Amino acid sequence: MEQKIIEIANSLGIDEIGFTSVLNYSYLSDLLRDRLNKGYSCEFEEQNINKRIDVRNIMPNCKSIIAIAVPYAEGYKKPVVKDKGLLSVVSYGEDYHKKLSSILKSIAEEIKKDISFEYKVCVDTSPLIDREICKNAGIGNYGKNMLLINDKLGSFINIGYLLTDLEILSDGVAENIDICGECDICIESCPNKALQKSGGINSKKCVSYLTQTKDYIPLEYRKNMRNQIYGCDMCQLVCPKNRTNSEKSADNDYRSLVIDLEELMKMSNKKFLSKYKNMSGSWRGKNIWKRNALIAIGNLKLKSMFGLVRDELNNESDMIKIYAAWALTELDRSKSMDILHNFIKYENDKVREEFIKLAGGGL
Ligand code: B12
């Protein structure tokens, strides 16, 4: 049956496919608890550990899992841009959740032509730990950047799997293999030092997280967000394991990942949806991109946008006002102090507090 499934996947253009019958992940409980205790987890992952550690919580009759990996950054070189924003390359093209789900569904429907079975598609959508499941299915091993790295494709891979009630036997839990040796380049290059030398990642410092959260972004993390509008690729771009992948020539046109900041600042919600809704990076909506654009304008010191940013102090969203104020202080500190002084009397306590913080005391 495994051979038949591999042939079906290959016929659909999928070369990296594997199987695991490991359903219980309670061996990760201590790691997950430790992460919670240290405050390293974030709102994008299930906080209830019990829901994460058994596949049968999602599909009670699950017996085995079919996992796949699909490369997404072939031929990608990060563009050098001085006055634009950037999306992470994982956001290129059609939303990978949709793309992989549809491939997995096609694989399942093909298998069903021969065998009747039940399945559930998971691509970044379940509380389960995708990487560990795919690691057990032989898709790859962890790098120090915490990514699952495939021998042939590197780490720029989307991963997903089918929970099934098929009887496919596999080896047990795959042991962790050290594939990085002495190399620490990702840890050293991580902008906010989110990757830990002892292993693990403090999500709250990861630039990818910061570009997605709706929570307040501490002042000291903003500079290192540079001009990222969604996600961060740093720990993968520097990784030697990705060299083969990035040297391949490709027809991909990655220009859609470069964002015109002025256009984004002025964009209506309707235009935003029509332009970006099929990209995975747009899932948090326009205002989060706009906040990140304000941070990018401040970091890139785009003084010509001072007026545009100042107008955002009239925005109805407190969040936008707060980041516009920050960007103004980065563009022209003394001019911005006069402006914040004029605006502060009309603001609520939350915004006032932020303006005062930016002024370093009284305004
Ligand atoms: C929450 C989340 C985030 C958070 C937290 C990331 C994190 N590392 O935990 C944020 C927003 C920061 C994030 C960022 C990114 N994410 Co994300 N994310 C998730 C999500 C939803 C849950 C992750 C999770 O459960 N973390 C908890 C830890 C315990 O699980 P884990 O990260 O898989 O950890 C394993 C190993 O890394 C290692 N490990 C973890 N901690 C420690 C500590 C020690 C001491 C040791 C030795 C090992 C170790 O063992 C763990 C257990 O097997 C998954 C989808 C899913 N349901 O799994 C996607 C997922 C992990 N993300 C993915 C991607 C693509 C990204 C980004 C590259 C996006 C981008 N370009 O900006 C970055 C990469 C950041 C990074 N270096 O990890 C892919 C990863 C694909 C791959 N090749 O590995 C996933 C699997 C989604 C998918 N199905 O494609 N993400």
Image (cartoon, rainbow, N blue to C red):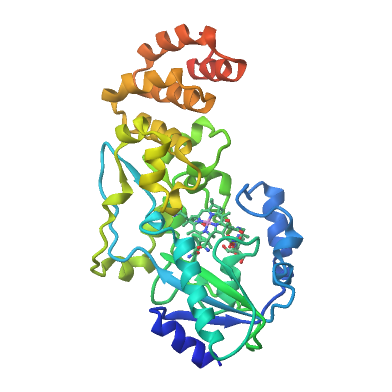
Relative vertical location of residue 330 with respect to residue 67 in this rendering, above or below: above
The residue under the point 51% across, 10% down is 344
User: Which quadrant, please, contains the N terminus?
Assistant: bottom right
Say whether residue 281 is left or right of residue 41.
Answer: left
Relative vertical location of residue 294 with respect to residue 59 in this rendering, above or below: above
**Which is nearer the eye, 93 or 193?**
93
Location of residue 113 in the rendering, given as x and y in whole percent from the top left corner: 53, 88
Where is residue 152, by image quadrant?
Answer: bottom left
Location of residue 293 in the rendering, given as x and y in whole percent from the top left corner: 39, 35
Where is residue 30, by image quadrant?
Answer: bottom right
**Which is nearer the eye, 321 or 333?**
321
Where is residue 237, by image quadrant?
Answer: bottom left
The residue under the point 26% across, 50% down is 79
Say whether residue 59 is left or right of residue 174.
Answer: right
Give ligand 1's quarter of the image.
bottom right
Relative vertical location of residue 54 with respect to residue 260 in this rendering, above or below: below
Can residue 166 be seen here? The reply is yes
Say whether residue 83 is left or right of residue 330.
Answer: left
The residue under the point 41% across, 10% down is 339
Number of numbered discs: 0
Can residue 190 be seen here? The reply is no
Location of residue 263 in the rendering, given as x and y in whole percent from the top left corner: 31, 34
**Which is nearer the eye, 57 or 353?**
57
Location of residue 78 in the rendering, given as x and y in whole percent from the top left corner: 29, 53
